[in-house]
Image: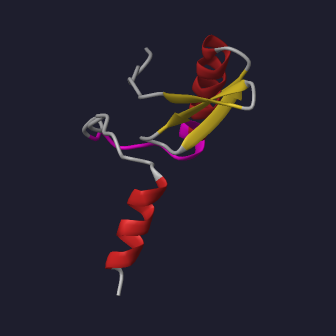
Amino acid sequence: MFNMKTFTAVLHKEEGVYIAECPETGTVSQGKTVEEAVANLKEATELYLEEFPVKETEKPIMTLFEVDSDADVKERVGARRC
């Protein structure tokens, strides 16, 4: 009988490929499409778990946040570091 576990895949595009990372295990993979990147991540994670089984843990909390990336913000932050 299979013991299925659900993991998280976080993806971003970098130089024409999708990078996929599993925050629960730290495994990373890539692919030309989202589907390929996730399939490769699944395979990498399965291989990782054969050697390093993970205990049951709570799912990571995922959220988004914004930062102002203007140059003047960097100058203000740098000015506060005394």
Which of 17/39 is in front? 17
Instruction: State the predominant SS element of the stretch in magenta.
Output: loop
Which of 8/73 is in front? 73
Left or right of residue 60: residue 17: right
The percent coordinates of residue 54 (x first, y second) are: 42, 43
Q: Is residue 54 magenta?
A: yes
- Quarter of the image for residue 39 reads top right
- The N terminus sits in image quarter: top left
Q: Is residue 74 above or below residue 57?
A: below
Left or right of residue 62: residue 35: right
Say which residue appears at 53% left-offset and 28% top-offset. Answer: 11
Q: Is residue 57 above or below residue 3?
A: below
- Quarter of the image for residue 57 reads top left
The percent coordinates of residue 22 (x first, y second) are: 49, 35
- The C terminus sits in image quarter: bottom left
Q: Which residues are magenta?
A: 49-57
Which of 9/74 is in front? 74
